[in-house]
Each structure stands twice: as C-alpha cells, then as structure tokens.
Image (cartoon, rainbow, N blue to C red):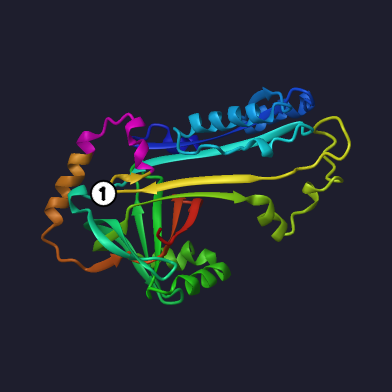
C-alpha cells in the first residue's frame, strides 16, 4: 500500500499493525521475529494485569496513527490478563477529489433515510465530467469519482427507488462482483453529470468474531486451536476480533477533516483542474446523480479494484 501514497500529492494511505505483548506471558521470540519480518508489525510490551492502563495505551497508539479519527478502540474489558498478546491493525486513508466540489454550492436538502423518514442534510453539488452508468440488473445508478494521485476512486451505488436499498442489498449479496466485473467497467460513460451527495461521516464498530463464526471460522476461537507455536501454555486461542471504521466525505474529498495534515504542493494542479472545468461549463448536463436516499459506497485501488472500504450510508 505504501506505493499508493509514495510520491503522490494529496494522498495519504497508511496501514500497519501493532502487537501488544503481555509482559507476564510473552510469545516466543521466533514468532515475534517472523511477525516483524513478514508483516512489519510494531511491538509494544504491556502489563495486561493493568487492563485499564493497557487498553488506554493501545487506544492512544491507534488514535495517534489515525490522526485522532479512531478513538477508544480497545476497552479494558477487551484485555485478557492470561493472553500472550493482542493484535491491533489500522488503515488510514485521506485524499482529495480529482475535481473538487465548490463549497459555495453546498445547500441544505432533504435526505430520505433508511428508516423511512426525511432529514435535512448538507448536500454537496457539482457539475463535471464523471464515469456513470445505469445497471439494469441492480436497478441502480453507479457513479465512480477519481481521487487525486491516480490510484484511488470512490464508487457510489444508488438504487432507482427511494425504498430500494434493501432490494439492492439482496442483489449485491448474491453478486457483489457485478460492481467490478468487466461488463460493469466497460458500461461506464464519461458524461457531464450533475452530482448531489450528502456530506457524511460514518463510525462503525464491528465484532468480527461473530462474522467469522457465521462464515464457519470457529476453531481458532476454541481451546484446541493449536497455537502452541505462538507462546507457552495450553489452550491458547483467539478470544475476539474488533474492527472500528471511520470515513467522512465532503466537498474536498474523503476524510477531509485531516486535510490540514497533508503537505500540499499542488496549488498549480488545482488551478489547472478549475480552468479546464470553466471551459466545460458550456456543455449541457447529460446525466443526473442525486443521492437523496440510502446508497452503497466503495473505496477502491485502481486498476486492480481492490476494495479498501465498503459501506452503506442511510442517513441520521
């Protein structure tokens, strides 16, 4: 992932992991050496007997690595004083839109929430060329917006009907690859599009153990998990996996609250984009993408379409 942000202006993509080590029950040295060698993890020895202090130290570490966007990831009840270690990973992404939205065009508008209610939201608006298509099978419009740096793009999947998100969800569960299949790629058209999106921020905490259990991954959580090469002791197993995600979208891009942390040298590039857009303003609008109802979104790496984030925004 480092190659995505290396040498790229207005792109921050940082991923990593930390092994919080129980100083009372240290893992084997070979395991730690392999973890550092193959996964580039950082090691942080802690006393798990002091569960509250250990949880604060781990959470503060992740908060620092994610510029304060992910806080309180680990609670004191998550720290098991008999466990040899705790693995914590993070992914931090910040990037500007290739063509940014004018904040002067941001207006209050109605958003039809997933609960069937209406709420007032700040809606960002823009008119520029974008890759857009209508998928008849999904009964949805798909909009792909590139981000600066050339490697990242964000895709929005909007159902045709205001109450169509649940039907769309069922279809995507059966064929999620339809968003990235060759047929879908080639059906995109570059059209001058009026785009309306809500400004939003999503924070979500997931108990991944439940998800893995539903997928049939069970043994690693049981006493006979056969993790004897990790540390001394019988019955070593994985006790839980917690994931917390935060993503925000506004006129400037994704996670734009941390745009101040980006060292930008591309004022000239922004001016060129704006000048090109001025020249295109005489071209009539060919398509509309009005996201005033729940939609799915993905953040992907191009050209491989590897998915970094996949989510649903339903308002509130």
* 117 relative to 14 in the view: left or right: left
Give the residue displayed 49% in from the left and 67% down from the top: 178
Q: Nearer the viewer, residue 297 or 187?
A: 297
Q: Position of residue 217 (x, y in %)?
A: 74, 54
Give the residue displayed 78% in from the left and 47% down from the top: 220
- Residue 264 visible? The answer is yes
Q: Position of residue 122 (x, y in %)?
A: 28, 55
* 9 relative to 286 in the view: left or right: right
As drawn, 218 above or below 111: above
Q: Which range is magenta? A: 255-269
Q: Is residue 268 magenta?
A: yes
Which quadrant would residue 9 be assigned to in this image? top left
Q: Nearer the viewer, residue 249 or 316?
A: 316
- Residue 149 visible? The answer is no
Q: Which residue is mark 1?
A: 99
Secondary structure of the residue carrying numbered label 1: loop
As drawn, 315 above or below 269: below
Q: Position of residue 170 (x, y in %)?
A: 54, 72
Q: Is residue 174 magenta?
A: no
Q: Residue furthest right?
A: 234
Q: Quadrant of the C terminus?
A: bottom left
């Amino acid at each position: 992932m480092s190659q995505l942000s290396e040498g790229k202006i207005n792109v921050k993509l940082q991923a990593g992991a930390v092994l919080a080590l129980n100083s009372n029950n240290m893992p084997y040295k070979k395991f730690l050496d392999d973890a550092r060698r193959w996964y580039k993890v950082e090691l942080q020895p802690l006393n798990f007997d002091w569960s509250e202090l250990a949880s604060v130290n781990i959470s503060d570490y992740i908060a620092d690595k994610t510029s304060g966007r992910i806080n309180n990831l680990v609670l004191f009840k998550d720290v098991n004083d008999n466990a040899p270690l705790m693995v914590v990973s993070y992914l931090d992404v910040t990037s500007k839109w290739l063509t940014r939205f004018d904040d002067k065009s941001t207006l209050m508008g109605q958003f039809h929430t997933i609960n069937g209610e209406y709420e007032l939201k700040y809606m960002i608006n823009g008119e520029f060329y974008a890759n857009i298509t209508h998928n008849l099978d999904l009964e949805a419009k798909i909009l792909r917006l590139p981000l600066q740096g050339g490697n990242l793009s964000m895709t929005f999947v909007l159902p045709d009907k205001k109450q169509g998100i649940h039907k769309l969800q069922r279809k995507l569960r059966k064929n999620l690859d339809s968003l990235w299949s060759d047929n879908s790629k080639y059906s995109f058209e570059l059209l001058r599009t009026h785009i309306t999106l809500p400004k939003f921020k999503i924070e979500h905490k997931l108990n991944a153990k439940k998800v893995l259990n539903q997928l049939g991954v069970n043994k690693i959580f049981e006493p006979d998990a056969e993790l004897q090469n990790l540390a001394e002791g019988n019955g070593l197993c994985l006790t839980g996996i917690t994931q917390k995600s935060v993503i925000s979208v506004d006129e400037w891009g994704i996670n734009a609250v941390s745009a101040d942390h980006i060292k930008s040298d591309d004022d000239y590039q922004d001016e060129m984009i704006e000048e090109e857009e001025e020249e295109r303003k005489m071209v009539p609008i060919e398509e509309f993408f009005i996201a005033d109802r729940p939609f799915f979104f993905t953040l992907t790496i191009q050209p491989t379409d590897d998915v970094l984030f996949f989510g649903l925004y339903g308002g509130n």
